[in-house]
Image (cartoon, grey):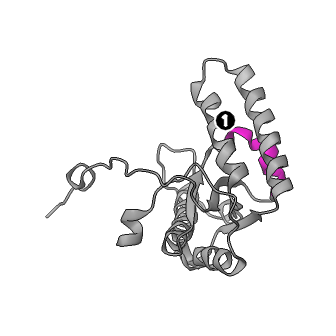
Amino acid sequence: MDAISARRSVRSFSDREIPDEILMSVLEAGLYAPSPKNRQPWSYIVISEHKEKKRFTEQMRAEIMKLYAQNLDRKDIIAALDTLEPVEQCSALVLVCYKNNTTAIHDDGVDWNMSAKDVEALELMAVGASVQNMLLRAQMLGVASLWCGDILYAYQFVKKYSEFPVVSAICLGYSNDPPQKTARNSFCEVFKFIK
């Protein structure tokens, strides 16, 4: 429980590199997540070379600014620029991809008010479980992390990295400034028991 309760999202990374064996251990943890019918609907692209991360960040900035110019009332878009610093600073940037190759053959008629098919929702939760495994393993090994969705504001650029949809990213490295504990919803607010 310690790794779960101690993990924080870090937004300022030092220039210290993660040793390869530690990085591989963090990444390997993602392989052991549960998934529907053991389909393991994830793949990852790891960018650790500094020049490539800088190029990625510069292109991401350009895409965010282009999107913001078309939507000046969207403060969430301009706020995504805050993610550029940790993306560039981190030791390894991991693009999280969703291998959605099973959804075309699966339609069981579940009708809900979401744009994802039921199998897509389940598989995306599995991808999230894989990410969580990596975040917790990083915490156990003293590696800081940030699960980042802001890369989606630059999706037209980001999607070029994979044949599968990129659904988020993980920044891994060593923290410059350990983040403070943030407020969480109370147990009673989240859980409802039916007896």
Residue plotted at (53% across, 74% down): 137
160 is within the stretch colored magenta:
yes
**Residue bearing the label numbered 1:** 81
Give the percent coordinates (x, y) of residue 74: 60, 23
| Local secondary structure at mark 1 | helix
Above/below status of 180 relative to 27: above
Quadrant occupied by the N terminus: bottom left
Q: Position of residue 171 (x, y in %)?
A: 64, 57
Q: Is residue 181 above or below residue 32?
A: above
| Quarter occupied by the C terminus | bottom left
Around disc 1, counting alpha carbons within 10 Å, would you say few (fewer than 14), some (14 to 19), or many (20 or more)? some
Q: Is residue 190 visible?
A: yes
- Horizontally, residue 152 falls left or right of residue 158, namely left
Quick check: 17 above or below 54? below
The range drawn in magenta is 151-161
49 or 109: nearer the viewer: 49
Tell me the chief SS of the magenta region.
helix
Q: In which quadrant of the rendered view does residue 152 lie? A: top right
Type of the residue with mark 1: Leu
Does residue 29 belong to the magenta stretch? no
Which residue occupies 66% across, 74% down? 23
